[in-house]
Amino acid sequence: MNSTGSVRVRFAPSPTGFLHVGGARTAIFNWLLARHTGGVFVLRIEDTDAERSTDEMIREILDGLEWLGIDWDEGPHFQSRNVDRHREAAERLREAGRAYPCFCTVEELAAEREAAIARKESYVYGGRCRAISREEADRRRAAGEPHTIRFAVPAGETAWEDVVHGRTAFENRTIGDFIVLRSDGAPVYNLAVTVDDLDMGITHVVRGDDHISNTPKQILIYRALGADPPVFAHVPLILGPDKSKLSKRHGAIAVTAYRDQGYLADAFVNFLALLGWSPGDDREVMTRQELVDAFTLERITGKSAVFDVEKLEWLNGQHLSRLSGREVAAIAAPWFERAGIGRLTEPQGDGDWFANLMALVKTRSRTLHDLVEQARPFFPGPVEYQPDAVEKFWQDPSAALAALAVAVDYVESEDRWGDLEAMEGRLRSLAEERGVAAGKVMQSMRVALTGQRVSPGIFETLTAMGAALARERLAAAREWLSRRVAGD
């Protein structure tokens, strides 16, 4: 623990791959804990694997965190810049008799491993070099004989009280004397992470269950360096819908891919926070501040969570629908630009036209991509008539033409645009005069104006579209249906 007593947590990704959903959830849990307690969130890039770490992955990780809105109070620190401290710690362990040089060759260790496999046993290093005297070890090191540094694991067990899993213990004989410094002087993960966490005053380590086997080694190093270990909380892994390990087919892709698919950062954070954690009530749609206010480590569950894309889409739709039209417009504008859809000159001279359109279509959209498709018919250009819409409402082209004839006259004569009740009353009166069911007119108009079977209310649609574009669409639909009639 640090001397101030405040919570200090870290997120320490390795830049050997993208920031995926599992790593993002770990970052979110640590960030929420820091913000809930008024603590400190530290970002550390664990880039000691020089061969696999790349600048591109570092940028991708930072981009993903920034999109998620996960800001850090310290960092990013780079683990590779702390290698001298790691080596110094290894030497301290050796001088204290808690670690020793190991001169076993790769071939000798491989033979031991193969022998253990033949006996159907898990391989644990037997500790052969621990018996070498300090004087002989020093002489062999001075002579330049290749060696690693191994931690001398004591007898007994290593246990800790895990916030998520309760008391967790490992028999030390199953751990074996493990390497902390490679023969080339490179620190091994368990040494580097422990020294870094100690130097940075990390009080709570929140990470995935896949790190549980590392924890006893790190606790042993902490104690050997004369320090108390931090609080550990190991979070169950995220599974695919079939309960297997999360893979690319389930959603184990870069977090930024979800940004590019049109998900909102707040919704994605909300979704990941609920994978293995609960606010303690029935809430599912939560703002970032609500998550911060409710978050505690004790509410992390002990069982694996399932990554459900349908749930993500639903939750994203809920967040989208809660935004104002103006807020959606600000977020969505770049999506329309990328789709090649220009901003339409407001049909009624209303400067809020785009925001009003977003307010109209957002409730039927689950992603920003959906939003663009829902709004596309309101921009100039032809529409595609969806086959299911044609089948349902234009199955009889002659009847559809009769309905659209009423619609054309209605649009030409309507002078109360925006007054939805008055617009509906006028259309119903005109339809009754012509002997055509008003419902048939509205249904045929919907297909003509949007090409879709389902859309916002027809009078909201007309108002947002404007008279000029509505006339153009009705004329195109009548021409299309006339060709169908002639073809029959």
Image: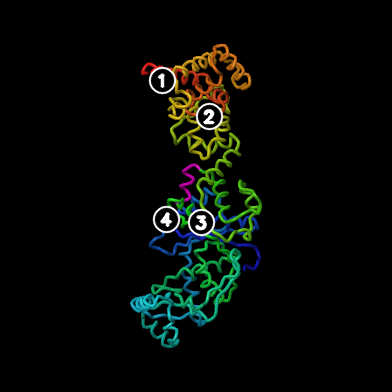
Residue 238 is labelled as 3
The residues colored magenta run 253-262
Discs 4/2, front: 2
Which residue type does callout 1 highlight?
A: Trp
Q: Considering only vertical position in the picture, is 253 above or below 405?
A: below
Residue furthest to the top in view is 433
Query: Circle 2: is it few (<14), some (14-19), or many (20+) Cα within 10 Å?
Result: some
Q: CA–CA distance between discs 4 and 3?
A: 27 Å
The residue to which callout 1 is attached is 480
Camera-nearest residue between 432 and 23? 432
Q: CA–CA distance between discs 4 and 1?
A: 55 Å
The x and y percentages for residue 445 are: 51, 22
Q: Is residue 431 magenta?
A: no
Which residue type does callout 3 highlight?
A: Ile
The x and y percentages for residue 113 are: 38, 76
Q: Kindly state the secondary structure of the residue where label 3 is placed.
A: strand
If the image is split into quadrants, where does the C terminus sit? top left
The residue to which callout 4 is attached is 55
Determine if residue 72 is in view: no
Upstream in the sequence, badge 1 or badge 3? 3
